[in-house]
Image (cartoon, grey):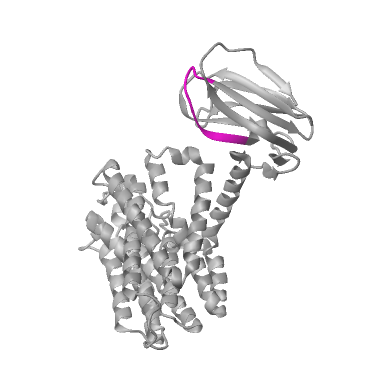
Amino acid sequence: MSLEVQNDKSPITAQEGRSFARLGFWWFPKVGPALAVGYCAALVFRVPGWATMRAIATVAVVGLCAGAYGYLLNDIFDLDVDRRAGKPNRMAAFSPGQRFLFCALALGLGFAPVLFRATSKTTVSLLALEYLVLTVYSMPPFRLKGRGALGLLCDASGAHVVANLYAISVLADARTSTANAPVLSTAVFILLVCAWELCLGLTGILVHQVEDRENDLRSGIHTFSTERPFSAIRVPMSLIYLGELVAFASLCIVLRKVAPLVGIAMAFYVVLLGLKIWSRWQHYRNFGTESTLMEWWLLSHVYYEAYFPLVAALQCTLLHPQISLFAVLHLMVFVQAFRPQLHDLRTACSWFILGGRLEIAERSSARVRAILFPLPGRRIDIADGGSGLWKVRAVRDGLSIRSHQQYVIRLKIRSDRPREIVFGVWQDHPPWDDMGFCEPLRLSAAWQTISRRFTARADDRQSYLGIWVGGMPGSVELRRWSIRAVPPGPLPAWQEGSA
């Protein structure tokens, strides 16, 4: 949860500065959605372009300062429990006076925009409330962090609900004329934002507490998750996540008149998410485990943190071209949130073409291409096959193999040059044993149609049909690779043909 303890008084390096207030913990999941809501509020309130840019800049600066304040304060008041538990804490490197200075600086800079722009009493009150909630969450004698469900509500309210209400209020202040009626019902818009952000905040803090449960127990910190087993959290957590999805879907419907790109992008993201889930089916199918359940609960968060603010900025750009600068800045600042998505997209596309995963070991290189002429198929182009056949593998995972069940494997395969491969069925987890069939095969430029029948020697719910094609560069083409269970019976002689 915290960074490595620094007992010396050395100055913070550039890299330490980026993680000093644990920027990655809150910038993407909390400031990103607040910026998106700000852009949507600009469309709802018909805010002019330059006024929108100034207001969004204010929301970003305040979000940066408030987030830093909350995490600095949390680390400061966790010093004793972290020390007793042997847990690292970055604030241990600084004197009490320095810690106070850091918090005062984050607090002062957060309120600085009030001095330079016209601000309503509602906006100032929301800003004060945000800092107040962040304070009572960590600071004794309140320290709501250790008071069960009250701590959950406090974190979700301060870091999400109040922060987004502040963003809406800042954009409402930026209207050039209060005579311009909002495009849609302000009350419905605010209500849906609050419902969505409350569920989003509860999901985030519960997942964090579950992941940090062992550390909290060692530190003596009492949270909602330390007081009850994971089994008691599963059902209410699933209902909260369902509420989050319903609230956001309703928000997309309400915003369709002013921000149709938000709903369109969400639909596109759902399609990509489906490809991602299916391309990694082995992980997501084991929904009974804690880690997988938490993955399910966080599936939509990538959209909120990366795509939603960018799409909302692009929607504003269609009305006010000058905001295109903010869309570019958003890509630059949030590039860390987009990089994993590009990798996941490439992985999903490869799976869609191959009909399975292409696993490439470190220092190896390969890609999958679709072949449409003269007959449909796919080609694995291997730029660097590494030092062994297993370094590049076509994997059809998610197989549930039953002991003594007979299976038939069929391939239609060739290579651009003579090469050795291995195909078979293995466990998709340690110790990675084969399930009763594993055979080397020599390929050539001629198509080979292969049929193999075998009896599984054990039960395993996480197995895969694999073709190991590494070890040398070149290409391997596949028109068919499949496995299916067949009725029990005497095993005929293995047959091999070519076509």
Is residue 475 depicted above or below 237 in this figure? Answer: above
Tell me the chief SS of the magenta region. strand
The total of numbered circles placed on residues is 0
- Is residue 35 left or right of 235 when viewed as pictured? right
Residue found 60% across the figure and 19% down from its top: 453
- Compare residues 52 and 413 and report the one nearer the observer: 413
Q: Is residue 141 magenta?
A: no
Q: Look at the image and tell me whether residue 215 can be seen.
A: yes
Compared across the picture, whether 273 is left or right of 364 comes to left
Provide residue 363's location: percent of width, then percent of height: 66, 42
Q: Residue at x 28, y 41 (%)?
A: 231
- Which region of the structure is painted magenta? 394-406
Determine whether 194 is above or below 362 in the image: below
Say if residue 86 shows up in the picture: no
In magenta stretch: residue 397: yes
Which of the pair 278/344 is nearer the observer?
A: 278
Measuring from the top left, give residue 105's x and y in whole percent.
Answer: 38, 74
